[in-house]
Image (spheres, helix red, strand yellow):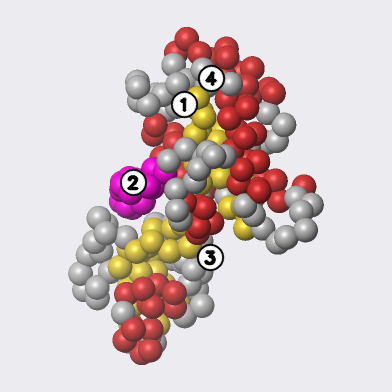
Amino acid sequence: PTPGMMPYEEVQIQLVDTPPLNEDYMEPGLLDLIRRADLVLLLVDLQTRPLEQLEESVRLLQEHGIVPEILGKEYSGERRPTFVPMILVVNKNDPDSDELLQIVLELLDEDWPVIPISVTTGRDLEALKRAVFEELKIIRVYAKPPGRKPDLGAPFVLPQGSTVQDMAAKVHKDFLDNLKAARVWGSASFDGQMVGRDHVLSDGDVVELRI
């Protein structure tokens, strides 16, 4: 597995390029890596039996207790599996392949989230980045020191539904222990509103912590 970073919307998202899933041999630790991933991109080749590639990949994962979230309602195995969110990425979707792509989409059994791309031409790579960002269900929150402007180039990245208290814990333990209140620009009723620890933050909020 080869790690790399993908910058998007001021957020650095780590991607790990793994060896192909193979019935005959699996890299040590590969399955554990997939289980612990926040999101899996299943990459198939549009020009080479993509539906067979998808079915084979899903079968191999299910045999090792890893099930795409989209198939969770239909899973009937005896063991409790690990459900992982997945996006189907269809590569080699070049301009002359749109008709083939439509056929593949019509034949898909499940309502997979699908992002067609072309690595060679760069087609729809921005759409893939956006889909990854949205599927991770994260928000960007910007810290504002009292009396100063916020640093809009370095957000704190939190799960959706996070509160002011969750952000304080990210900043420093002292803020978490001694936080009295906070001012929020964005999701508050008005800019600069004083809020408590339990205020739920939204993507793009600016927060000034008070201790």
* Residue bearing mark 4: 48
Q: Nearer the viewer, residue 195 or 47?
A: 47
**Marks 2 and 4, the one that precedes in the sequence:** 2
Badge 3 amino acid: Gly
Q: Which residues are magenta?
A: 1-18
* Residue bearing mark 2: 2
* Residue bearing mark 3: 161
Foreground: disc 2 or disc 3? 2
- Report the Cα–Cα distance between label 2 and label 3: 31 Å
SS assignment at label 2: strand
Q: Residue at x 62, y 27 (%)?
A: 52
Badge 4 amino acid: Thr
List x then y, in percent, for residue 106: 68, 22
List x then y, in percent, for residue 96: 47, 9
Question: In this image, 7 relative to 113: left or right?
Answer: left
The answer to whether the residue labelled 2 contacts the one labelled 3, judged by CB atoms less than 8 Å apart, is: no
Q: Residue at x 44, y 13 (%)?
A: 95
